[in-house]
Image: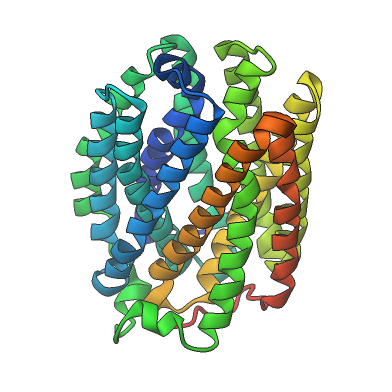
Amino acid sequence: MIELDRRQRVTLTWAGLAVVLAGFEGSILVVALPAIAREFHAGTSALSNLGSVLAVGTLGALPLATLADRFGRRRLIAAGVAGFSVVTLASAYVPSLADLAFLRLFAVCFEVLVIGVATALIVEEAPAGSRGQAVSVLALLSGLGTGITVVAYPLLAPHWRWLFIASGAGLVAAPLIWWLLPEGRTWQGVRVTGSAIRLLMQPPWRRRMVILAAMFALLAVLLEPAGLLYTLYASVVLSWSPVQISFLIVVSGIAGAVSYLAGGYLTDRFGRRGPAIGLTVATAAATSLSFATSTVGFFVGNVLWSAFASAGTPVFGAWSGELFPTRARATAEAAIALAGAIGSIVGLQAVALLSASAGLGGAIELEGVAAVAGALLLFLLPETKQQPLPE
C-alpha cells in the first residue's frame, strides 16, 4: 500500500482525473473503428493512413512538453485537457474520414502531452520506494477512462459520434485541474537553466535517450497497428459483433487493471531493467499470437497481451522518469512518445503494404520481430530502482 501525504493524494486525484479523460477520449476511435470504417467506406489501407496521421500529432507534444519543464506541470496538464476536449467534441461533427484524421491529429498531441506530463509529475512527487506503484495507479486510471468507452459504446453502437460529444465533460474539468492541482515540489526545487532539449543532448542523457527512443520506436512498429486495428480484425476477419468485441475488451481490461498494480509492485521490488525486458518480450509474443490464430487464440492472446503490456506500463513509467533530470523530464517523456510515433507510422504503413499478400493478421504478426529487437536494447540502460531523481 502506498503511503501518501495530503498534498500527494490531491496531486494523484487531479492528475488522475486528467488521464481518465485522456484514456476515455483517446480510446473512442479504436473501440468504434469498425463503425467508423463502415460509415466512411474505409479499408485497411485508408485506416492505416489514418493511424499514421494520428501518430504525427505526437510531434506537437514535444514543444509543449518543454513548456512544462520551464513553467511547471499544473498549467500544461490543464491546458492539455482543455485542448483535447475541444478537438474531440468537434470530431463528433466531421463529414469525412479525412476531416476526422485532421482533428484527431491535434487531439493526440494534447493527449500525449497530458499523459507524459502527468507521469513526470507523479514520478517526481511519489515516495522513492513506491514510484512504480504510484505510476501503476495513474495507468489504472487511464484504463478506467478506456473502460468507460468500452462499456458505453455497445449501448450506443453504431452511434460513435455520441461518445465524442460526451467528451465535452473535459471542458468542465480543465479549469478545476488548473485551480486545484498542486504544482510539483520537485520541479519547484530545481533551477531551470537553458533548453531542455539541449540538456538531453548532453552525456549521459543523450545515450539514454537514444536507447529508450529506439526501443519504443521498435515496440510501436508492432503495438500501434495491433492496437488500432484489432477491433477491425475481429469484426471483418472473425465476424464478431460489437458486443463480442466489447466483451473481449472488458476481459482484457480486467486483466490489464490487475496487471497495472502487479507491475507497480513488481518493479518496486525487483527493479526496472529485468521486468521491462521480460514483459516486453512477453507482450510481443502474446500480440503476435493474437493475430496468428483463430477465434480462441485471438481472445487468449489479447488478454495476455493486455496483461503483459499493462504490467510493463508502470515499469517504464518509473524507469523513464528516473533516467532523466527534472529540468527535462517532461520533454524526455514527449521525445520518447515521438520516437514511438515514428515507429507507429512505419508499422502502419508496413501493414498496409503487407496485408495485400499476408493478410491483416499475418502482416501484424511479422512485426513482432521488431518488438523483440527493441527489448534487447534495454540491456544497455542502467538500473535506477529507488535512486534519487537527477536534477
**Residue 343 place in picture, x, y as percent:** 56, 55
- Residue 5 visible from this viewpoint: no
Q: Quadrant of the C terminus?
A: bottom left
Can you say whether 318 is above or below 284 in the image?
Answer: below
Estimate the x, y position of residue 45 in percent, counting from the top left: 53, 32
Whether residue 171 is visible to the viewer of this picture, yes or no, is yes
Residue at screen point 51% across, 19% down: 34
Residue 383, image x, y percentages: 68, 76
- Left or right of 99, for residue 308: right
Name the foreground residue: 77 vs 165.
165
In this picture, residue 190 sits left or right of residue 318: left
- Tell me: 184 left or right of 36: left
- Classify residue 273 by image quadrant: bottom right
Where is residue 107? Give x, y as percent.
32, 42
How many marks are shown on the rendered structure? 0
Quarter assignment of residue 259: top right
Q: Is residue 20 above or below residue 65?
A: above
Is 322 drawn above or below residue 222 in the view shown? below
Give 105 or 120, whichever is nearer the viewer. Answer: 105
- Identify which residue is drawn at 48% across, 82% down: 390
* Residue at 44% from the left image edge and 48% from the top image edge: 55
Q: Quadrant of residue 227?
A: top right
